[in-house]
C-alpha cells in the first residue's frame, strides 16, 4: 500500500474514534425539545415570528397583559420609565413598498415622547433590496418617533443592499443576547404558569442550540486530534473532496427516492416527467452552486385542466430549510401558469396537504424531515436508515397529495377554470 494512502487511512480511522467519543459524550445530555422534534427550530416564520408575537401581544393567549411586552421593551431601550397603556403590537406589518415589517410596536410612551419600534428579524434568510431603507422611510412618515432594529442570531450588520446607504440609523440586536435575556426574564415572571414556563424553557434551549458553536470540550477534542503528527495537513487535503462527496451522496438519495416512488404514482394517473438537475453529479453540482435554484422531481397528471398541465413534486434549494412538496401548472408552451387569482381557493381545497404559497406560481408545504443542506443534518442522507426514513416520509406525503387530486379532480378543475 502507498505510504501516503496508508497514512490517510490511519487518520480517518482515528477521526472516526474521535467522532464516536464526542457522540458518546453528547448522548448523555437531555435531548428532548418540542421545537426540535417538530423540525421548526430554525423556522423564522413558523416558530420565532409567531411565538415572539404571541408573547409580546398584550392580548395574547398567555392572559398576562403587557408584562412580557414591558420586559422586552426595557431590554431593547434600557429605559425603566415606559408607558404601554396605548401600545399595540402588529406582525407582518404591510407598508407602501409592499414589504412587511416583522414586528411593529407602536405608541410606546418614553418620557413625553411616543415611539414606534420597527423590528426586522433574520435567521437564515438574506436581506432584500432596500428593506431597512424602506422601513426607515415608513417610520419617518408616521407621527411618532421611530426606532429601527435589526434582529439576527449574533447581532450582525445589515448589508448595504438592505440599508441602501452607509448612513442609515438602526440598532443591531441578537437572539444570543437581547432575546435570550428577555426569555430568561419571562421565565422568571411565569413561575405560577407551569405550561407557559416550560414552553419558555424549551424556547430558551432552542435559542441556545441555534446560536451555539460546537461546545468548548468538543472543540478541544477535535483540536487535540488535529495537532497530532500530520493530522491537520492530511485532514485539510481530504477536505478538498468534501463537496464532490456530498454531490455523490445527494445523487444517490434522489435516485433512491425516484426508485421508491417509481410506478406507484401511476395508480393516481401521475407520471414522471423530468430528470433535470438530478441525472448526474455535474447537474447536481450546478444546482447547488446557486442559492435558490432547486433540485426537484416532478410528476404530471395525465389529464389537462383548463388546457393546462398540472404537476406535483418534491424539491429542495440550497437556501431552503427542508425538502418541500409543491403544486404548479404549465400551459401548452410549458410556461408556468400564475395562480395568483385562485391561490386562496386552492389552499382551502388542499387544507393540510399544502399550506403555503410563494410568489404567484405555486403552492407548497415543507416535508418536516429536519433536513438542511448546509448544516449537520445533511449527513442524514449518508446514513442508510435515516435516509430511508426521509424517503418514506416524502413518498407517503407525495402519494397523499396525488391521491387527493385524483379523487377530487372535478372540484380542482372547477377552481382552475378561473385562472
Image (cartoon, grey):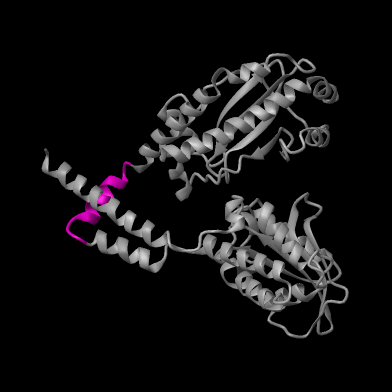
Q: Position of residue 312 (x, y in %)?
A: 66, 27
- Please state which of residues 107 and 322 is positioned toward the viewer in this rendering: 322
Residue 221 in picture, x, y percent from top left: 31, 63
Is residue 231 on the magenta stretch? yes
Q: Is residue 178 above or below residue 13?
A: below
Q: How many marks?
A: 0
Quarter where residue 219 is shown: bottom left
User: x and y percent of residue 390 in the render?
Assistant: 53, 38
Q: Is residue 407 left or right of residue 290?
A: right
Q: Quadrant of residue 302?
A: top right
Q: Nearer the viewer, residue 65 or 306?
A: 65
Q: Nearer the viewer, residue 151 or 394?
A: 394
Q: Name the quadrant of the C terminus.
A: top right
Quadrant of the image occupied by residue 86: bottom right
Q: Is residue 327 left or right of residue 105?
A: left
Residue at 49%, 64% in the rendered image: 212
Q: Which residues are magenta?
A: 228-241
| Position above or below: 174 against 272 | below
Query: What residue sits 32% from the left and 58% below the top?
Result: 21
- Decide if residue 157 is in sight here: no
191 is higher (above) or lower (below) than 247: below
**Is residue 123 shown in magenta?**
no
| Magenta portion: prevailing SS class | helix
Quadrant position of the N terminus in the picture: top left
Against 168, residue 263 (above or below) is: above
Which percent across, then down, holds residue 237? 26, 47
Amino acid at each position: 500500500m502507498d505510504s501516503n494512502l496508508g497514512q490517510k487511512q490511519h487518520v480517518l480511522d482515528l477521526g472516526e474514534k474521535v467522532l464516536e467519543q464526542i457522540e458518546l459524550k453528547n448522548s448523555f445530555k437531555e435531548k428532548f425539545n418540542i421545537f426540535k422534534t417538530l423540525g421548526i427550530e430554525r423556522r423564522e416564520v413558523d416558530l420565532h415570528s409567531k411565538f415572539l408575537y404571541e408573547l409580546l401581544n398584550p392580548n395574547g393567549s398567555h392572559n398576562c397583559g403587557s408584562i412580557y411586552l414591558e420586559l422586552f421593551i426595557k431590554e431593547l431601550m434600557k429605559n425603566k420609565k415606559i408607558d404601554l397603556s396605548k401600545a399595540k403590537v402588529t406582525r407582518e406589518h404591510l407598508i407602501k413598498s409592499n414589504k412587511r415589517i416583522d414586528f411593529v410596536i407602536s405608541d410606546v410612551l418614553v418620557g413625553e415622547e411616543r415611539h414606534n419600534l420597527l423590528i426586522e428579524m433574520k435567521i437564515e434568510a438574506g436581506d432584500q433590496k432596500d428593506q431597512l431603507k424602506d422601513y426607515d422611510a415608513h417610520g419617518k412618515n408616521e407621527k411618532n418617533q421611530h426606532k429601527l432594529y435589526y434582529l439576527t442570531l449574533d447581532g450582525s450588520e445589515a448589508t448595504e443592499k438592505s440599508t441602501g446607504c452607509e448612513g442609515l440609523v438602526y440598532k443591531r440586536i441578537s437572539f444570543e443576547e437581547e432575546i435570550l435575556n428577555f426569555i430568561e426574564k419571562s421565565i422568571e415572571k411565569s413561575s405560577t404558569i407551569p405550561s407557559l414556563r416550560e414552553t419558555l424553557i424549551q424556547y430558551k434551549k432552542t435559542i441556545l442550540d441555534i446560536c451555539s458553536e460546537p461546545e468548548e470540550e468538543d472543540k478541544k477534542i477535535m483540536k487535540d486530534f488535529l495537532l497530532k503528527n500530520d493530522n491537520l495537513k492530511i485532514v485539510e487535503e481530504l477536505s478538498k473532496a468534501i463537496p464532490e462527496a456530498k454531490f455523490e451522496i445527494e445523487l444517490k438519495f434522489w435516485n433512491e427516492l425516484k426508485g421508491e416512488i417509481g410506478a406507484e404514482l401511476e395508480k393516481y394517473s401521475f407520471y414522471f416527467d423530468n430528470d433535470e438537475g438530478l441525472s448526474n453529479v455535474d447537474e447536481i453540482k450546478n444546482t447547488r452552486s446557486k442559492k435558490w435554484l432547486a433540485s426537484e422531481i416532478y410528476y404530471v397528471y395525465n389529464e389537462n385542466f383548463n388546457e393546462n398541465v398540472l404537476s406535483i413534486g418534491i424539491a429542495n434549494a440550497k437556501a431552503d430549510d427542508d425538502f418541500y412538496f409543491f403544486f404548479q401548472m404549465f400551459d401548452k408552451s410549458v410556461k408556468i401558469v400564475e395562480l395568483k387569482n385562485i391561490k386562496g381557493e386552492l389552499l382551502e381545497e388542499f387544507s393540510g396537504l399544502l399550506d403555503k404559497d410563494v410568489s404567484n406560481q405555486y403552492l407548497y408545504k415543507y416535508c418536516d424531515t429536519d433536513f438542511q443542506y448546509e448544516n449537520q443534518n445533511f449527513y442524514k442522507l449518508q446514513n442508510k436508515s435515516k435516509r430511508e426514513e426521509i424517503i418514506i416520509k416524502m413518498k407517503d406525503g407525495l402519494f397523499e397529495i396525488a391521491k387527493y387530486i385524483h379523487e377530487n379532480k372535478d372540484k380542482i378543475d372547477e377552481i382552475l377554470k378561473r385562472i
